[in-house]
Image (tube, grey):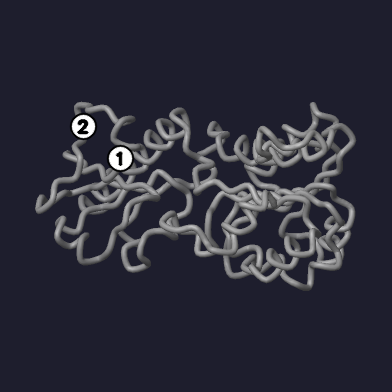
Amino acid sequence: MIIGVSEDIIYKFVKNTKKYTFEKIQEGKKYETILISLDTKLCKKAWKKMGCPQILSPTTNISYIPEELRTHTINIHPNQLGHITATAEHAFCLFLMACRKVRNDILDHRNQWLGRQLSNMKVAIFGHGRIGKLIEGYCKPFGIETRTYDKNNSDLEKKQLLTWADGVFVCMTYDDQTEGFFNLDSYEDIKQGQIFVNISRAQIIDKSLIIKCLDEDKWDCLCMDFINHEDLPYFIDIDYKKYYNQRKMILTPHIAGNTSDSLRMAINVVLKNLEATNEKNISTLSQ
C-alpha cells in the first residue's frame, strides 16, 4: 500500500516496509490512505480529488479535521499513549519558565527576574488523566504540594482549589461539558499572583476571563500551547499578542506533543490501528 504523507515533519519519521510505501502527497494522484498532521489543511473537495482515502491522524484529538471527514479517520486512543510523555513535559516546562520569568529580556533589571521557588508551592491539576498524573509526578521531586480535580468533583471543590493554588494546570478533555469551564464566575476565586497553565484546548477558558485576569494582574502569567482562541496554527490573536509582548503570557503554537521521539511513536501506533482496522474489515467481508 502506498500512503501519501502531507507534511515534511511527519515524512521524516516514516520508513518504507513490506506493507507500506510512503511518499509525499502528489497533486492529482489518488491514494487509498493518507497520513496527515495538525498543520494539514484538508477539505472534502481536496479529499475527493485524492480518491476519498482513509485518513491517518497520529493524534488523539481530530477536531482539526472537517467534521464530515472524521468518520473516514483513524487516530489514536488516549489509552495507547502511556509511553508518550511529551505533552506533560511541555506543560511542566511552561510552568518552570513562568516561575523563573524566563520570558524576560536578557538586559532587564535584576528586579524583573525575581521569580518563584518551586519548593512548597501549591499546585492544582484540573484533569487527572494520563497527562495530569504525569504532571503530578513531576511536581513531587520539587517539593510541590498537589491537589487534583476530575469529573466527579464538585463546583465547591473547584472554587476551593482556585483559591488555594499558587499554580494551576489545565489538562482536561475538551467537550461540551468543559467548554467555558473557567469563566468570569471563576474570577473572584482565583488566587492573586497565580500561574495558570492550559495544555488542553483554548475554549476551556473563556476569553473574557483571560482578558480580565491579565488586565488586572490577577494572574502572574498565563501559559498556553496555542496562539489564538480558535486553536488554529495560522494566526496569532491580537489580544494574545499584546499580552505576550507585555510578558504576561508564554505561548507556543500547539507543539506540546511534537518531539522526534513522540512523533515516531505516535506514527507507529496509528499504523497499527490502520492494520487492525483493515483486518477487521477483511474479517467482516468474509463472514
Residue 192: x %, y % from top left: 86, 56
Asked if residue 109 lies left or right of residue 284, the reply is right
Q: Earlier in the sequence, mark 1 or mark 2?
A: 2
Question: Which label sits on residue 275?
Answer: 1
Residue 119: x %, y % from top left: 86, 32
Residue at 19% of width from left, 27% of height from top?
Answer: 18
Q: Identity of the amino acid at label 2?
A: Lys
Q: Are marks 1 and 2 in contact (CB under 8 Å)?
A: yes
Query: Which image quadrant is residue 49 in?
Result: bottom left
Asked if residue 259 lies left or right of residue 57, the reply is right
Name the one closer to the observer, 63 or 114.
114
Question: Which label sits on residue 265?
Answer: none
Residue at 51% of width from left, 40% of height from top?
Answer: 257
Name the one closer to the observer, 267 or 42.
42
Q: From the image, tell me which residue sits under label 2.
A: 19
> Mark 2 packing: few (<14 Cα in 10 Å), some, or many (20+)?
few
Name the one closer to the observer, 169 or 230.
230
